[in-house]
Amino acid sequence: MAIIDFPILYVPSPTIGRPLFSGQIFVGTEDLDPEIPANQKQLRIVQEDGTKVDVNQPFILSAGGVPVYNGATVRLDVDGNYSLKILDKNGA
């Protein structure tokens, strides 16, 4: 298991420096494009109480550029090494 370990994952827009509103997170097999469904790994969120929940991809960021599930900020979890791809809400 490899936790994607940020105290709170915050994703700013690389062009405007503000939160990446409704950004899309893809996680997949190391060195492969995680946007391609065949390359994706099972992504889980870790809730505040430690409960892990399987989620679909892309996982959508909140308006504040952080991963949120049922209104609470969450951590992301995936088994083993991984590739990470983050796109804006338009897929760019």
Image (cartoon, grey):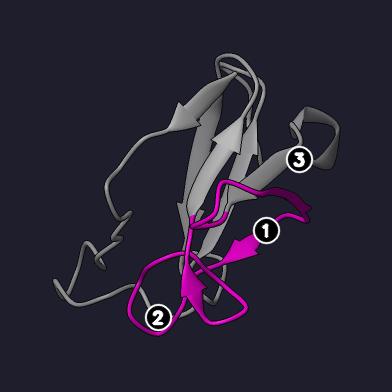
Taking 83 as reference, is 9 left or right? left
Query: In terms of secondary structure, where does tag 3 sit?
Result: loop
Q: What segment carries the magenta color?
A: 47-74
Q: CA distance from mark 1 to mark 2?
A: 14 Å
Report x, y in % for residue 53. 73, 51
Which of the pair 49/56 is nearer the observer? 49
Q: Position of residue 30 (x, y in %)?
A: 58, 17
Point out which mark residue 36 bears: 3
Based on the picture, tell me whether residue 58 belongs to the magenta stretch.
Answer: yes
Query: Which residue is located at x 63 percent, y 22 percent?
Result: 32
Q: Nearer the viewer, mark 3 or mark 2?
A: 2
3 or 2: tag closer to the N-terminus = 2
Q: Amino acid at mark 3?
A: Ile
Separation (CA) of disc 3 from disc 1: 11 Å
Badge 1 amino acid:
Pro
Locate residue 27: give its quadrant: top right
Q: Quadrant of the N terminus?
A: top right
Residue occupying image coordinates x 30% and y 55%? 8
Tally of numbered discs: 3
Neighbour tally class for label 1: few under 14, some 14-19, many 20 plus, Cα within 10 Å = some
Looking at the image, tell me whether mark 1 or mark 2 is earlier in sequence order.
2
Does 35 appear above or below 14? above
Residue 58 - label? 1
Residue farthest to the right? 38
Measuring 76% from the left and 29% from the top, which residue is drawn there?
39
Residue drawn where x is 30% and y is 60% of the image? 11
| Residue 85: % across, % down | 50, 44
User: On the image, numbered disc 2 is attached to which residue?
Assistant: 21
- Give residue 65's quadrant in the image: bottom left
Horizontal side of residue 21 vs 79, given as left or right: left
Predominant SS along the magenta part: loop
